[in-house]
C-alpha cells in the first residue's frame, strides 16, 4: 500500500510539473484582426510544428453540399493568384470558361440529349486541359518540400478544419507568406480534377472498406436532425454535383482570421517570430462571424437498429447519445470509456477478448463523431468466429448493467485517473499533437489552458458519478445498433 | 458574356492580390540550417549487450527499446509468423514468474507500458515509463525480453485471435492486394510469405521456446534508452538487470535465394468493389547501396512525393486516384522491391496500368529535367534535418543501425551522392534499375467493370482471395 501511495504521488507530481512547464512555454497573442497565435517554445531542434485550425467543418455545410468543407480543404493546396499561375490573366479567363462548361454540362446531364451531353463533356474536357496548361500542378507542396517542410497535410472534421506542416524554423516566413496568401484568396484551379480525386477518396474510405461503410450508415441512423449524422465526405451524388462557384462561396463565408488559431510549437521566439506573423497574417481583414443555425437532436425515444449487408466478416457498433464538454457528465463518461476499454485490464478487454474470447478486439469512444456538440458514446467490436455480433452486443449490455449496479472500486478508479495523468504528460512529447490540442482548446474550449485544467476535473470524478452517468445515458431507448454482416448470414 | 464576367468576378473576387511588397515565395532564400544533435552515448554490458543512451530532461519520461536479431524472415516455411507470434507471447504469456494478469495490472496502475513486435529486420521489446517509476518498470521489461513463461492458455487465446485476423485480411482490398503482391514478387522467399490458418495452427509452445532460446541472445541484442535519467546510473542498472543473462552463440538459418526475376505476370483477384487496387513492380537494389543512392533519386521524381510525376499525372491532372505513387521497399541483405501503385476507379483500370508503365518508360527514355532533379535534391537534403530533431529517434536509429550492421557513414554517403548526381546519371539509374517489361502486376477488383481486359498486358493468372 505504501508503494501504491508513493506511485500515485509521483504521478501527480510529474503531471503537475509538466503542466507548469507548459504554462511557462506558451505565449498567446491575438492580432488586431482576431487571429489568435499560440507560441510554444519547446524546441531544442531548429524546427516548428504548425497547426492552423479554422472554426469551420462539416456542420457548417448547406443542404445538398455535404462534404464541401472537405473539398475546400483540398483546394487550399492548389495555390493562389500569385502562387502557381504561369499567366494569371489567361488562367483566370480559362477558369471562368471551365466553370461555364461545368455548369452547362450539369444542366445538360439533367435535361439534354445524349449527343448534347457528349458534346458538353468534350467542351468541358478541352476547357480543363487549357486551364491546366496555365498553372503548376502542386505549387504548395513543391514550395514547402524543397524548403524542408514535412507532413504538409490537412484534415476536415465536423467541428474544425486543420492545416498542418512542420518546417525548419528559419523558413517560418515562407509559411506565413504562403498561407496568408491562401486566405487572401485561393484560386480554385483544377477544381473538377480534384472533385474526381475526392470521389475516389470516398470510394476508398467509405465504400470499399467495410468499417467505413458501417460507420457511415450507423452515424446517419443515430442522428435524425443534427448535422453530425451527415456523411462528412459527402455522398457520391453531392460530390459529383459540386461546382467551383459553390465551393468558393463556402470558402468566403468562413475563412477569416477571426475564426482561426495558429499554433506554432518548437523552436519559436516570440520577439523574432511575431513580426513575421503580423507582417503577413496581419493584412487579412476579419470577417463576419457567420454561424449556421444547426438543427438540434431531439431526445431519442426508442432504440434504432440497422443491419448493413456487406461481403465481409461481421462487425458491430452501438452508440448512446450524450452531452459534450463542459457538461460534467462528458468528463465522467470519458472515465467510463477508460474503465471499459483502456488497456488490457479494462473491463471489456478482460471479459470479451480474454475470458469469453468472443471478440478479436473491442473498443469504446466517448466523443464520436466529434466533440463540439452533443455526441455519442460508442461501443465497437469485431467478433471472433464462431461468435457473432449478437454475442458481442449481449456482452456489452451486461457490462453496462454491471456498471449501473455496482460502484467501481477505489483501486480501479485510481488506475484510470493514473492513466489520464500519464497521458497528460505523454501528450506533451509530440510537437504536432500538442499544436493540434492547444489550437482546438483555444478555438472551442474557451482557452488553450483548459487542456490543463480539464485534468483537475477528471481528478474529482467519483465512483457514484460514474454509476449515475451510466444509468442515465446507457438506456435502451437512447441506443442505436448497427451490425455489418453478409447477406446470407441473416 | 455577361455571365462569363460575373463568374470571373466570383472566381477571383477574393483575389484582390497580395500586398506589393510581399516577396515571390519561389525566390525566397534561406540559409541551410546547421544543427548538430548530441550523439548518443554508447556502453557495452559485461555480457556483450550494446546500449545507447540519450539523456533528455525535457519531460519526466523514460523510453527504452531492445532490438533483437530475431527476424520474421527466420520463420520456418510451415510456421510463418513464428517471430511475430513469439514477440506477441513474450508480452501476453507472462514473464519472470509473473502471470500476464499481474504484469498488466502493475503496468497499467503505473500508467506505464511494455510492448513487443517483430518485422523482417528485428524483434523488439519496448517500454515507456514516467521517470519516477521507471525502477519498477525496468524489471518487467527485462523479464518480458529474457524470461518469458509462454502460458499455454494465453498462447491459445492469441492463436485464435490471429486466426480471426487472418480471416479478416481479405475484407480490406488494399491489405489483401499488398499481401498477394509481395507473395508473388518474392515467391519462395520468407519476406513474401504470410500467415495462413494452417501456419498459425501449427505453432506450438515448444516452437516459441525454441525460437526465443535460439535468437534472443545478448550478442544479438542492442538497447536504446532515452529520456529523463542519469546515464551512468542507467548503465549500472542495466548491468544489474542483465548480468545473469549469459547467452550463447546464435546459429542463424540460411535463407533461400531471392529470385531476382519473378515476372512478368499479371495476377487478378476478384472483389466486388468499385475501385481496383493496382500494384506493379519487381525486385530491386539493396537499400543505401551505391546503385540505390542513384535509383532512389529517379524514384523520388517518378512517384516518391506529392510533386512527383505519377501523382501529378494520375491524381492531380486526371483525378484517377486519391492514392498513387511509387516506392522502393527497405532491404539490406536481399533485393528490395520497386513498387508503383494506384487505387483507381474500376472503369479506368487499364488506363491507369498503362499510365504507370508509360511513366516508368518515360523516365528511362527521356530522363529527368534539371529542375526536377534540383527539386528532389533540395527536398531530400532539407528534409533530412527532421532525422535529427528527436534525441530518442536518433538514439533508436543508432541502435538499429548497429543491429543491422550498416556501414558507418551510409547516410552521409547517400547525401553526398545526392549533391553531385547529374540528370544523366539519374536517367542511367532508371534505365538500369527499372524493368517495365518484367513487372509483376497485381490487380484486386471487379473485372466486369474494367475498361480493358487485363490480358492486354500479358498472361493473367486468376487467384482466389481467401
Image (cartoon, grey):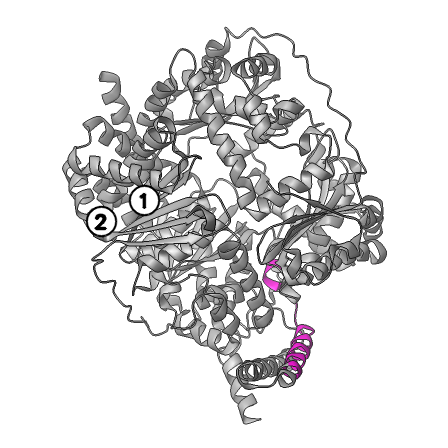
User: Which residue is located at x 72 percent, y 40 percent?
Assistant: B337
Q: In the image, A307: left or right of B352? A: left
**Residue A400, placed above or below residue B342:** above
Q: Separation of disc 1 and disc 2 at Cα?
A: 44 Å
Chain hosting mark 1: A
From the image, state whether disc 1 or disc 2 is nearer to you: 2
Q: Is residue B65 visible?
A: no
Mark 1 element type: helix
Query: How far across and how far down the image is residue B422, in percent?
Result: 81, 50
Query: How far across and how far down the image is residue B304, in percent?
Result: 67, 50
Query: How far across and how far down the image is residue A34, in percent?
Result: 35, 66
Mark 2 element type: helix
User: Which residue is located at x 17 percent, y 35 percent?
Assistant: A463
Label 1 packing within 10 angstroms: few (<14), some (14-19), many (20+) = some
Chain hosting mark 2: A
Between A370 and B463, which is closer to the camera in this rendering?
A: B463
Q: How many marks?
A: 2
Identify the main secondary structure in magenta. helix
Between B20 and A230, which is closer to the camera in this rendering?
A: A230
Q: Kindly identify which residue carries mark 1.
A: A23
Q: Is residue A125 magenta?
A: yes
Q: Is residue A99 visible?
A: yes
Instruction: Return the disc, 1 or 2, that comes first in the chain's sequence.
Output: 1
Between B296 and A490, which is closer to the camera in this rendering?
A: A490
Whether marks 1 and 2 lie on the same chain = yes
> Residue A476, which numbered label?
2
Between B213 and B418, which is closer to the camera in this rendering?
A: B213
Q: In the image, B167: left or right of A119? A: left
Q: Quadrant of the C terminus of chain B?
A: top right
> Residue A247, which numbered label?
none
Please report the bounds of the magenta region as a residue range. A118-141
Amino acid at each position: 500500500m505504501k508503494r501504491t501511495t508513493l506511485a500515485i504521488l509521483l504521478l501527480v507530481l510529474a503531471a503537475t510539473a509538466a503542466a507548469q512547464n507548459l504554462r511557462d512555454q506558451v505565449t498567446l497573442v491575438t492580432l488586431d484582426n482576431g487571429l489568435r497565435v499560440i507560441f510554444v517554445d519547446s524546441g531544442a531542434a531548429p524546427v516548428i510544428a504548425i497547426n492552423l485550425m479554422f472554426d469551420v467543418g462539416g456542420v457548417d455545410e448547406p443542404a445538398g453540399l455535404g462534404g464541401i468543407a472537405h473539398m475546400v480543404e483540398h483546394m487550399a493546396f492548389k495555390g493562389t493568384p500569385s502562387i502557381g499561375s504561369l499567366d494569371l490573366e489567361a488562367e483566370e479567363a480559362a477558369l471562368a470558361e471551365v466553370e461555364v462548361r461545368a455548369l452547362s454540362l450539369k444542366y445538360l446531364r439533367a435535361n439534354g440529349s445524349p449527343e448534347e451531353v457528349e458534346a458538353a463533356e468534350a467542351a468541358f474536357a478541352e476547357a480543363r486541359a487549357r486551364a491546366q496548361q496555365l498553372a503548376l500542378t502542386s505549387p504548395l507542396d513543391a514550395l514547402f518540400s524543397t524548403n524542408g517542410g514535412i507532413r504538409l497535410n490537412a484534415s476536415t472534421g465536423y467541428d474544425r478544419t486543420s492545416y498542418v506542416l512542420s518546417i525548419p524554423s528559419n523558413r517560418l516566413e515562407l509559411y506565413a507568406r504562403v498561407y496568408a496568401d491562401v486566405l487572401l484568396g485561393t484560386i480554385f484551379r483544377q477544381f473538377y480534377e480534384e472533385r474526381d480525386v475526392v470521389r475516389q477518396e470516398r470510394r476508398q474510405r467509405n465504400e470499399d472498406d467495410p468499417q467505413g461503410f458501417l460507420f457511415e450508415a450507423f452515424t446517419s441512423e443515430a442522428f435524425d436532425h443534427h448535422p453530425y449524422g451527415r456523411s462528412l465526405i459527402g455522398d457520391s451524388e453531392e460530390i459529383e454535383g459540386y461546382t467551383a462557384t459553390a465551393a468558393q462561396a463556402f470558402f468566403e463565408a468562413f475563412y477569416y482570421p477571426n475564426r482561426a488559431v495558429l499554433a506554432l510549437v518548437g523552436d519559436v521566439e516570440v520577439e523574432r517570430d511575431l513580426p513575421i506573423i503580423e507582417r503577413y497574417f496581419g493584412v487579412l481583414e476579419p470577417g463576419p462571424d457567420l454561424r449556421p443555425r444547426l438543427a438540434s437532436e431531439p431526445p431519442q425515444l426508442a432504440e434504432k437498429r440497422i443491419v448493413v449487408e456487406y461481403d465481409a466478416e461481421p462487425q458491430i457498433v452501438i452508440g448512446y447519445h450524450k452531452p459534450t464538454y463542459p457538461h460534467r457528465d462528458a468528463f465522467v463518461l470519458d472515465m467510463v470509456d477508460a474503465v471499459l476499454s483502456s488497456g488490457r485490464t479494462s473491463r471489456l478487454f478482460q471479459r470479451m477478448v480474454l475470458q469469453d474470447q468472443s471478440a478479436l478486439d473491442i473498443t469504446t469512444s466517448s466523443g464520436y463523431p466529434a466533440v463540439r456538440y452533443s455526441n455519442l458514446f460508442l461501443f465497437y467490436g469485431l467478433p471472433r468466429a464462431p461468435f457473432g455480433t449478437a454475442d458481442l452486443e449481449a456482452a456489452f449490455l451486461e457490462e453496462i448493467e454491471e456498471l449501473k449496479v455496482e460502484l467501481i472500486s477505489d483501486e480501479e478508479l485510481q488506475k484510470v485517473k493514473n492513466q489520464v495523468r500519464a497521458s497528460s504528460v505523454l501528450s506533451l512529447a509530440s510537437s504536432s499533437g500538442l499544436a493540434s490540442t492547444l489550437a482546438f482548446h483555444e478555438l472551442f474550449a474557451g482557452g488553450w489552458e483548459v487542456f490543463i485544467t480539464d485534468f483537475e476535473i477528471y481528478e474529482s470524478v467519483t465512483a457514484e458519478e460514474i454509476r449515475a452517468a451510466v444509468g442515465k445515458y446507457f438506456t435502451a431507448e437512447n441506443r442505436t445498433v448497427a451490425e455489418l454482416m453478409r447477406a446470407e448470414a441473416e | 458574356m455577361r455571365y462569363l464576367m460575373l463568374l470571373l468576378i466570383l472566381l477571383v473576387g477574393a483575389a484582390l492580390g497580395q500586398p506589393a511588397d510581399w516577396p515571390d515565395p519561389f525566390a525566397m532564400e534561406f540559409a541551410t540550417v546547421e544543427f548538430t544533435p548530441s550523439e548518443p552515448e554508447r556502453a557495452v554490458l559485461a555480457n556483450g549487450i550494446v546500449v545507447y543512451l540519450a539523456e533528455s530532461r525535457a519531460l519526466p519520461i523514460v523510453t527504452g527499446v531492445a532490438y533483437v536479431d530475431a527476424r520474421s524472415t527466420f520463420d520456418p516455411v510451415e510456421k510463418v509468423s513464428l517471430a511475430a507470434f513469439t514477440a506477441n507471447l513474450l508480452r501476453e504469456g507472462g514473464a519472470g514468474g509473473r502471470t500476464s494478469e499481474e504484469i498488466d495490472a502493475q503496468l497499467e496502475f503505473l500508467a506505464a507500458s511494455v510492448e513487443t513486435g517483430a518485422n523482417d529486420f528485428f524483434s523488439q521489446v519496448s517500454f515507456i515509463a514516467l521517470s519516477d517509476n521507471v525502477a519498477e518498470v525496468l524489471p518487467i521489461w527485462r523479464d518480458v525480453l529474457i524470461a518469458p513463461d509462454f502460458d499455454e492458455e494465453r498462447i491459445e487465446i492469441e492463436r485464435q485471435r490471429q486466426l480471426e485476423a487472418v480471416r479478416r485480411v481479405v475484407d480490406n482490398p488494399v491489405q489483401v492486394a499488398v499481401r498477394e503482391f509481395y507473395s508473388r514478387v518474392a515467391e519462395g522467399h520468407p519476406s513474401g510469405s504470410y500467415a495462413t490458418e494452417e501456419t498459425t495452427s501449427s505453432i506450438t509452445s515448444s516452437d516459441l521456446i525454441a525460437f526465443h532460446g535460439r535468437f534472443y541472445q545478448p550478442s544479438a541484442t542492442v538497447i536504446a534508452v532515452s529520456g529523463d535519467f542519469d546515464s551512468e546510473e542507467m548503465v549500472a542498472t542495466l548491468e544489474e538487470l542483465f548480468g545473469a543473462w549469459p547467452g550463447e552463440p546464435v546459429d542463424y538459418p540460411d535463407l533461400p535465394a531471392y529470385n531476382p526475376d519473378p515476372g512478368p505476370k499479371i495476377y487478378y483477384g476478384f472483389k466486388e468493389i468499385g475501385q481496383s487496387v493496382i500494384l506493379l513492380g519487381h525486385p530491386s537494389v539493396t537499400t543505401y547501396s551505391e546503385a540505390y543512392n542513384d535509383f532512389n533519386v529517379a524514384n523520388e521524381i517518378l512517384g516518391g512525393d506529392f510533386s512527383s510525376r505519377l501523382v501529378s499525372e494520375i491524381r492531380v491532372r486526371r483525378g484517377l486516384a486519391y492514392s498513387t505513387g511509387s516506392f522502393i521497399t527497405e532491404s539490406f541483405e536481399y533485393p528490395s522491391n520497386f513498387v508503383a501503385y494506384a487505387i483507381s476507379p474500376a472503369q479506368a483500370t487499364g488506363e491507369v496500368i498503362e499510365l504507370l508503365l508509360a511513366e516508368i518508360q518515360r523516365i528511362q527514355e527521356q530522363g529527368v529535367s534539371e529542375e526536377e532533379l534540383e527539386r528532389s535534391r533540395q527536398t531530400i537534403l532539407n528534409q533530412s534535418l527532421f532525422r535529427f530533431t528527436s534525441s530518442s529517434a536518433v538514439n533508436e536509429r543508432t541502435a538499429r543501425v548497429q543491429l543491422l550492421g550498416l556501414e558507418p557513414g551510409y547516410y552521409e554517403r547517400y547525401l553526398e551522392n545526392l549533391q553531385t548526381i547529374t540528370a544523366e546519371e539519374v536517367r542511367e539509374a532508371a534505365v538500369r534499375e527499372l524493368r517495365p517489361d518484367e513487372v509483376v502486376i497485381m490487380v484486386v477488383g471487379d473485372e466486369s467493370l474494367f475498361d480493358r481486359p487485363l490480358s492486354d498486358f500479358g498472361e493473367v493468372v486468376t487467384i482466389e482471395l481467401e
